[in-house]
Amino acid sequence: MEDVVVEEAEVSGAAEFAPALVAAHPLGHSVAVAVGPELRVFDLKGGCAVSMSDDSGGSSHSDAIRAISFSADGILLASAGDDKLVKIWKTDSWRCIRTITSEKRVSAVAISKDGLYVTFADKFGVIWLVTLGEDGEGQVSADNKPVSIFGHYCSIITSMKFSPDGRFIATADRDFKIRVTVFPKNPLKGAPEIQSFCLGHTEFVSCIAFTHLSGGSSFLLSGGGDSTVRLWDYINGCLLDTCHVKGKVGELAEPNETEDSNLAVADICLTNDGLLAAVAIQSLNGVMLLGCDHVDKKLSFLKVITMENSYIPTSLASSSSADLLWTVMGASNMPNQAASQLLTRVRIIPRFKKDLLASSDHSPAILEDSEVPYGEKLLLALQGSLDISKQEEVLASVLAALKVSMHKMLVKKNYSEERREQRKRGRNDKKIKK
Amino acid sequence: MTRTNGASGGGGGQQAAGKLPRKRFYRARAHSNPLSDSHFPIPISPDDVELSQHYPRYFPADKDEHGDGEVAAPRIRFADVGCGFGGLLVGLSPIFPDKLMIGMELRDKVTEYVKERVLALRASNPGQYDNISVVRTNSMKYIPNYFRKAQLSKMFFLFPDPHFKEKNHRRRVISMQLLDEYAYVMEVGGIIYTITDVEELGIWMRSCLEKHSLFEAVPDEEIKVDPVVKLLSTATEEGQKVARNGGQTFQAIFRRISLQEE
Ligand SMILES: C[S@@+](CC[C@H](N)C(=O)[O-])C[C@H]1O[C@@H](n2cnc3c(N)ncnc32)[C@H](O)[C@@H]1O
């Protein structure tokens, strides 16, 4: 009995700290930020905040959004999270066309390359699939219930992505595993064929990113709680290179920051050509840039773009058209957090492409608020406020919560071990007394 | 996460060499919860499985480890999942003397027992039982950490825990989800053997295998002539117990196939 209680608590991770997320429309038409149950979208073509409408008949998000993802063509956006809802939005009208109810909390979501299916992962590590219908309108019969297509045995999926050619779906988990699964022609019958496992991380895997096809092949990058970014030949599950970010950050971060050995990789974002990777790292105020050599199959440390001390991005995004790297910092589900405090901070790095480093001119590495496209209008829409002092207060608490949360993820295993041992002892005691 | 210790892992042998360990010292909890996190070492990837510790005669320490190129190093080919006290491995070892086999067992003390048992058998039968070993692990979480794609030619699931309650069915060692992983580590043509004395579980295991597109039933004629099949109900401790009590058994034997295009 006791076993069961512990197991559920560990797997469900109730009311766990939820970092703010950012996603960029692949063609640069819009940018979305999620914090708590709020989905904020700014229209970069019209230059205005988007007001979302919902005629899917489902409820609105009422708890932390854990994942947002645009379809490859940018026609759809999926959002999902702790309220067990998966919502599909059409990005031309910003109407919600579909609300899918999961039995469990949702930790990751992705739309297949052809835009025909949405997949989402629940808190038991099971991956579900729903048909979206030919035109993305979701005009499909009511019995179009999610079907489970595969699973990671009792782990939590942290990231799920389709390969650029749409043939594979990659899933990363909290148990250091990355599974690459063949995405079949008829996925409704399940996805039983595993192409590879990418094994090498020694802690949870927090994020994965595919490079776009170049010369017929693409690579997978992953980041994790073991302070590494890894480069994979995902077809064969071969680890090609490992970049230890810890040493690199150590040289740059404040001395007292390095005391905290907690340098989990939080997010990875690649340029369109896949040659440059931006990496968000716990405790690093800024982003680290890594070069990704597709010929030598190597990662190389390039530089750190430092931001103000209190700014540690929780999520990164870029679109293939504009060379902007979007970064956001924020969180929900923090102790004593009021709904009015769902503030985020958005910072943008311009010219996010390989020649960013070669540039000899002195244009800024980070846009000032006044230089951001549509300026305050955009910031107000995505951040929720322009009030610097209010924001600073929130960011300070995000900073503290980030540290606690990552620390918890890292020590969780040891903790359960101790508890296990204790329970075991208890059991033996009983036997002896008998 | 460090390295695994094999059967010859030093220091463990309290027993005088050659003396078979007595089982009652190793009695452990009958049912384990496979969902709890591990506190035993797990190889990070199949490359980290220390074969020389498990099968020292096949991987002599004095030989240059990096002498690759000449003969391909042997690999583990059979896995007995939830091997219990190891009776199947002991039965299989002389039938397939050139195949490396591993038992996977969650319970610590049971694993220790099997280690001692193998060491004792090796000591009293020089030149034999060098191809079997055991590892303590949670097979439901870590199969891909031990075996590469298409590495195994046989997998065994003998008398697994039944987990009767509906909400515990996901703890069953055969499920649609886990069959994906077993199919991944098995070569096309490899065979998966399951047996149980619990009818409900027998039906469950068979139906999972039937539904899975990467497995197909092995025809009866083949089952009849497969020397391994007899061992399923006779070789293991659990099998012998069931036989003593005159219990019925239910087996499902399936072959790993490649995906059929429609
Ligand atoms: C009923 S016993 C059968 C043992 C043996 N196959 C036999 O026939 O005698 C089931 C065994 O599976 C082991 N087991 C259960 N779950 C396991 C897991 N997740 N990984 C490895 N072993 C497991 C148990 O500890 C137990 O020893």
Image (spheres, coloured by chain):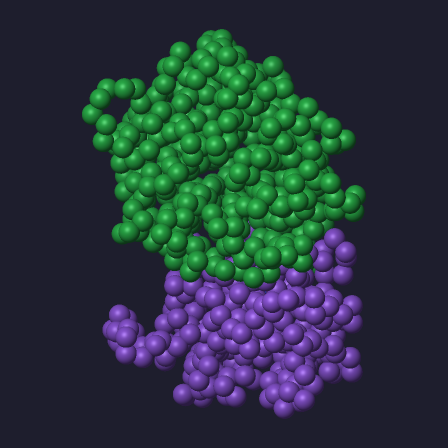
**In the rendered image of this protein, which colour is used for chain B?**
purple
Q: How many marks?
A: 0
The location of residue B203, given as percent across then percent down, is 76, 70
Using residue A112 as the reference point, say whether residue A288 is left or right of it.
left
Up the image or down, A96 lies above or below A346; here it is below
Q: Report whether residue B136 is seen.
A: yes
Q: Residue at x 78, y 72 (%)?
A: B199
Q: Is residue A363 above or below residue A86?
A: above
- Residue A222 lies, in percent from the top left, at 42, 45
Chain A colour as displayed: green
Q: Is residue B150 above or below residue A389?
A: below
Question: Residue sitting at 42 percent across and 32 percent down?
Answer: A321
Provide residue B46's location: percent of width, then percent of height. Answer: 43, 63
Residue in view at x 57 percent, y 66 percent: B182
Residue A250 makes an appearance in the image: no
* Residue B158 found in image quarter: bottom right
Query: B229 or B117, which lies in front?
Result: B229
Looking at the image, residue B59 sits to the left or right of residue A427; the answer is: left
Q: In this view of the protein, which residue sits in the foreground, A73 or A112? A: A73
Which quadrant of the figure has residue B160?
Answer: bottom right
Residue farthest to the left, as pictured: A360
Residue lying at the far bottom of the rendered structure:
B225
B155 to the left or right of B212: left
In which quadrant of the rendered image does the C terminus of chain B lie? bottom right
Q: Where the N terminus of chain B falls, by quadrant? A: bottom left
